[in-house]
């Protein structure tokens, strides 16, 4: 299985965020600078928000596919099925007429 570059980038970004948060909680990394802490916080918030939005889009696509795939035929599909039956009926009548007049149209097919 081949992993794309975008997947690797996402895993790398999440890994860096987890490492930074773990280091802050354990006490290995202390951000004394208020501006630096603000930028780290905003960066983490933006990354998480982007992943949440992408995940929500994929989840919405999955749920809508599951809901719509269990329904009956669409009106267009129903009309196509009726039209198929009509064409089949017309072909049968044409064969019947051809046999009545003595011509064999099935040889031409």
Image (cartoon, rainbow, N blue to C red):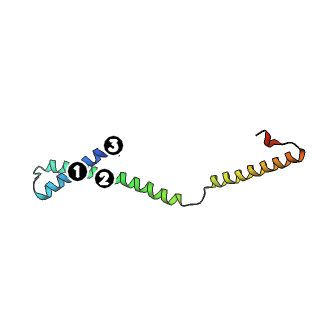
Image coords of residue 95 (percent x, y): 81, 47
- State the residue position of label 2: 49
The span from disc 2 to disc 1 (Cα, nearest Å) is 16 Å
The answer to whether any part of residue 42 appears in the image is no
Give 97 or 48, whichever is nearer the viewer.
97
Q: Find the residue positioned furthest to the right.
A: 101
Give the side of residue 82 with respect to residue 94, left or right.
Answer: left
Disc 1 crowd rating (10 Å Cα; few below 14, some 14-19, many 20+) is few
Helix, strand or loop status at disc 2: helix
Helix, strand or loop status at disc 3: loop
Image coords of residue 109 (percent x, y): 76, 40
The residue located at (13%, 50%) in the rendering is: 34
The residue located at (32%, 43%) in the rendering is: 6
The span from disc 1 to disc 3 (Cα, nearest Å) is 17 Å
**Is mark 1 in CB contact (under 8 Å) with mark 3?**
no
Helix, strand or loop status at disc 1: helix
2 or 1: tag closer to the N-terminus = 1
Disc 3 crowd rating (10 Å Cα; few below 14, some 14-19, many 20+) is few
1 or 3: tag closer to the N-terminus = 3
- State the residue position of label 1: 15
- State the residue position of label 3: 4
Give 70 or 92, whichever is nearer the viewer.
92
**Is mark 2 in CB contact (under 8 Å) with mark 1?**
no
């Amino acid at each position: 299985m081949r992993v794309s570059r975008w997947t690797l980038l996402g895993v790398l970004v999440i890994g860096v965020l987890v490492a930074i948060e773990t280091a802050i909680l354990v006490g290995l990394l202390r951000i004394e600078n208020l501006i630096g802490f603000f930028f780290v916080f905003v960066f983490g918030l933006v990354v998480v928000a982007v992943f949440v939005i992408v995940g929500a889009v994929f989840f919405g696509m999955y749920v809508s596919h599951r809901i719509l795939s269990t329904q009956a035929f669409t009106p267009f599909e129903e009309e196509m099925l009726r039209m198929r039956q009509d064409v089949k009926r017309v072909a049968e009548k044409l064969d019947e007429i051809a046999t009545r007049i003595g011509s064999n149209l099935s040889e031409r097919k």
